[in-house]
Amino acid sequence: MSMRFSVVLLAVASSLTLGADCSWGDEPKNDPFRWLEEVSSDKTLAWVKERNAACTDELTKGPEFAALNERLLKNLDSKDRIPSISKDGQWYYNFWRDDEHKRGLWRRTTLDEYRKDKPKWETVLDLDALSEKEKENWVWQGATFLPPKYERCLIALSRGGADAGVEREFDVTSREFVKDGFTIPEAKSRVSWRDVNTLYVSTDFGPNSLTTSGYPRITKEWKRGTKLADAPIVFEGKPDDMSAAAYWDLTLGYEREFASRRPTIFTNELYFRRGSQFVKIEKPDDAFVTIVRNWMYVSLRKEWTVGNQKYPAGALLAIQFESFLKGDRAFDVLFEPTERKSLAGFSATRHHVILNELENVANHLYVLTPSDGKWKREAIPDAARFSSAVVSPVDPDESDDYFLTVSGFLTPSTLFLGTVGGKPAEKLKASPAFFNTNGLEVTQHEAISKDATKVPYFQVARKDLKLDGSNPTLLYGYGGFQLSQTPTYRADTGASWLEKGGVFVTANIRGGGEFGPKWHQSALKANRHRAYEDFAAVADDLVKRKVTTQKHLGAMGRSNGGLLVGNMLTLYPDKFGAIVCGSPLLDMQRYHKLLAGASWIDEYGDPDKPDEWASLKTFSPYYNLQAGNKYPRTLFTTSTRDDRVHPGHARKMAAKMIEMGHDVQFYENIEGGHSAAADNKQAAFMSALAYMFLWKELK
């Protein structure tokens, strides 16, 4: 889930009659809106068009929407944005969209040229021209290069923004697709180069080749000039795995072959090729291993005792890979968590490791260097308070250079280029401000959840904010999959909400990764209610502090965050005045049977197991709707091309609420995939729609 989610237990009526033959019980066969799960049938699309028309008729008429939409699009298309780059060979590549390039340009330049205010770019592939030529709505997914020459790559393109895409061999020297080159049909594929004439391909090979989650489980070795269907199998997972794949590490001097099985989203088995066989690497099933050159790094999700040593959950361990293969289990501890400190990530350069630590939801960076059997630790100067820092190596095979991007709620992104052990990082690019921040400030607060857990949250508001309960306030959250919500520059929120005098709040609830794996694991399955109690506690705290009141308080979330605010709708309707629920999971009785849903069973639970359904149904918004209840007005958004979270969730929820007589709005973008937008124009429109709805309801 870009791959990019219970509530207070309460008595729920076992059935609710909707007319003569529409009963709501534990059997999904009684669902009268199941037909809306048909993604693109004439009947469902007719319903979608009818709801879209009603939504746009209410929210898009008049000059205010047009002005906001135009401004948001202008921000997204701005030529002054930072063009993000990645180094492949001697070139720095960037993918770019603006008003002249709706689908986008894949282009490249040199570092010296990139340093200039207006770099000269060499276009490698024009997606607008390609889409026009091939009569396809291509959306860029990325490129996988073949080292060491970096002349050939596999370009991934999606139709309309779906996760599934096609892979096509491309020559960046001639800037053309290779005639009769490797081409892999549309699927959620994983492809790895072995050499210029050989690929490892994990894709949809037909019946029984995918997992129950819809991802590949079989890898084949495909030789140029042969049929993919005839390629021999290299590695195979199980049908009920989340996914499985084999792949090559082509790091010069460290060429190795690996394979992995992911039985669930949080567990994996890693294998290393020794001779003719794959040998399983000894580690906890829920630990994730990264092997870079001669080092093996282990990220722990739970406590691990090995080699007479106990290592805590959330720790990062390191060991020489060859020593590990010979039986050594004496790991170096590179990071150890505390109650309010976790590891946000790490990056390996040629000779060092950069740690990104999160302490009370603030980033701190450290460089670790192996020396004489120990690791020397040095700090990289911190970013400004209430900012986020993201670091990535430029070329870990060749140098100790790194990119550092710093941003905050009120601070546009700045890109730095640094070298570990070198002079201070060089400022390469800075994004302009896309909204007026004069008089605004960021503060951090804590709410007390139902079980007395302290839940931090960020508030962005005017410095002279009147604490009289009258402020339109938007509460945003996610709370799942160990994903942290850190300070982020949101140009759409600033222009659409903050400039108008609204208050924006980000809640760091359980289920996320702000305080490590324990923070996440405390809200899994039957304990999901803790995430929702945390979010409700933040809402209560905002009212208690007289920032806002119920009628001025809105909630917004997407994907797993859509499930979050869906539960605010059904379980805490008296706390909110309006809700925007985007690309959501809502029918938790059938989520595991729709698209990639089966891969999230470890997060939510298995509806087919009676004991797990007993808890799941308490946080299934679709199941818990009741005709007699009063709910905050809600806008549901989704995409027809979302092949990760099924659009049926939002469709059915809206349809059921309308059938019950509740006043809701619904908008479905025909393109866009899970992000619900395939280009800047669509992204601007979807944002304008959401913020126009919220301001209308909450002001």
Image: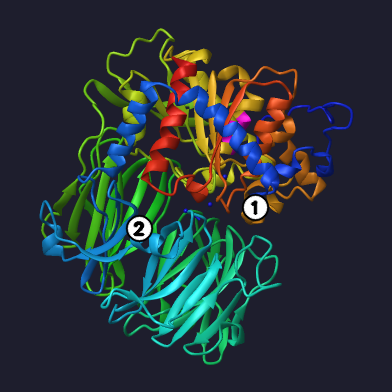
In this view, 486 is above or below 247: above
The colour scheme of the drawn protein is rainbow
Residue drawn at the location 32% of the way across and 29% of the way down = 494
Residue extending furthest top?
468
Q: Does residue 661 appear in the picture of this structure? A: yes
**Which x, y percent locates residue 151?**
29, 79
Residue extending furthest bottom?
275
Q: Which amino acid is tagged 1? A: Gly
Q: Nearer the viewer, residue 624 or 481?
A: 624
630 vs 231, left or right, is right
Distance from disc 1 to disc 2, alpha carbons, whole Å, reads 33 Å
Q: Nearer the viewer, residue 441 or 32?
A: 32
Secondary element at image label 2: helix
Secondary element at image label 1: helix
**Which x, y percent locates residue 306?**
54, 68
In this view, 550 is above or below 363: above
State the mark number for residue 128. Answer: 2
Q: Which residue is disc 1 drawn over? A: 597
In this view, 341 is above or below 329: above
Q: Is residue 494 magenta?
A: no
Q: Which amino acid is tagged 2? A: Asp
**Which x, y percent locates residue 405?**
26, 50
Q: Categorize mark 2 by other alpha carbons within 10 Å: few (<14), some (14-19), many (20+).
A: many
Q: Is residue 566 magenta?
A: yes
Q: Categorize mark 1 by other alpha carbons within 10 Å: few (<14), some (14-19), many (20+).
A: many
396 vs 620, left or right, is left
| SS majority, magenta | helix
Badge 1 or badge 2: first in the primary sequence: 2
The residues colored magenta run 563-567
Cβ atoms under marks 1 and 2 closer than 8 Å: no
Q: Nearer the viewer, residue 518 or 17?
A: 17
